[in-house]
Amino acid sequence: MNKRSTLDDRQREKVESLSGTTPSVIYEVIRREGDHELSRPFSALWWSGVAAGLAISTSLMCKGFLVAVLPDAAWTPAISSLGYAVGFLIVILGRMQLFTENTITPVLSLFLDPRPINFARTARLWAIVFCANMVGCLVAAALLAVARMVPPAQLAGILEVATHYADVTALQHLVWGMPAGFLLASLVWVLPRLQGAGEVLAIVIVTYMIGLGDLSHVVAGSTGLFVAVFVGEITLADALLTGTLPALVGNVIGGTGMFAALTYAQLREEL
């Protein structure tokens, strides 16, 4: 004789919804989001990307604020890196166009249908979003370093963080960009299952670890590099060739070449 279920209808629906969120379902959710982004017009992508570049610059700014008030101690990065999460919270929760999120979102569709037209669509999206992000970072750096839109003490903290970005070699930006790209792609992967406080906590944890690990994120790091350019620490060519471009390659390798490719490989038969 079968026992009656002790779950009511609402509880059963919750169990079914959670059990249905399989990796293949998550893949399809992110793939559809990528298809939507690929079909958006230039102006929508561009202005969302510029806004993301400006917003992500608050990661540098807020980390600099904490550096300015904290003592120079071994534990200081454990606190100051909390500021690094601020820009990512604004960008991701605000659904702005950030290049490193696009190392996985549109690529999942490309894996399923690798025709030349889809390569071209992905390249278009990447080019628009990346250039827009860089413009936003450049404007933010000018506001901080040239217009001096923050008090001198806080600006000193920002300049200290920016100088650190400028001191990193091209090879280090490349290598350190790989785990940063992997972590951002993994964040994109888990977010469809989260809501509310869970979503906020996931963003804070992952991006805090990127900041704490001094990993190279091409967009957030470029703001620091551009600040260093404006204060005369490095040239623009140095910023782009030894900082931005190597970090870009590292983020793509980590996000697309490692995380997205491995995700597709494990689900290829199911898909």
Image: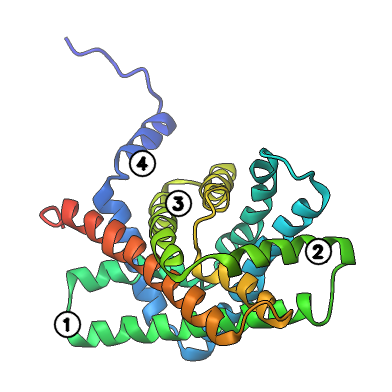
Front: mark 2 or 3? 2
Q: Which mark is residue 115?
A: 1
Is residue 201 depicted above or below 141 in this figure? Answer: above
The residue pinned by badge 4 equals 17
Q: CB atoms at circles 1 and 4 under 8 Å apart?
A: no
Instruction: Say which quadrant the C terminus sits in.
Output: bottom left
| Cα separation between marks 2 and 1 | 50 Å
Farthest-out residue, top: 1
Residue type at mark 2: give it: Ala
Front: mark 3 or 4? 3
Is residue 33 depicted above or below 5 in this figure? Answer: below
Residue sitting at 39 percent across and 75 percent down? Answer: 36
Q: Which mark is residue 191?
A: 3
Q: Tell me the crowding category of disc 3: few under 14, some 14 to 19, or many 20 or more residues within 10 angstroms, Cα based.
A: some
Q: CB atoms at circles 4 and 2 under 8 Å apart?
A: no
Query: Residue 43: percent from the left, percent from the top?
Result: 53, 90
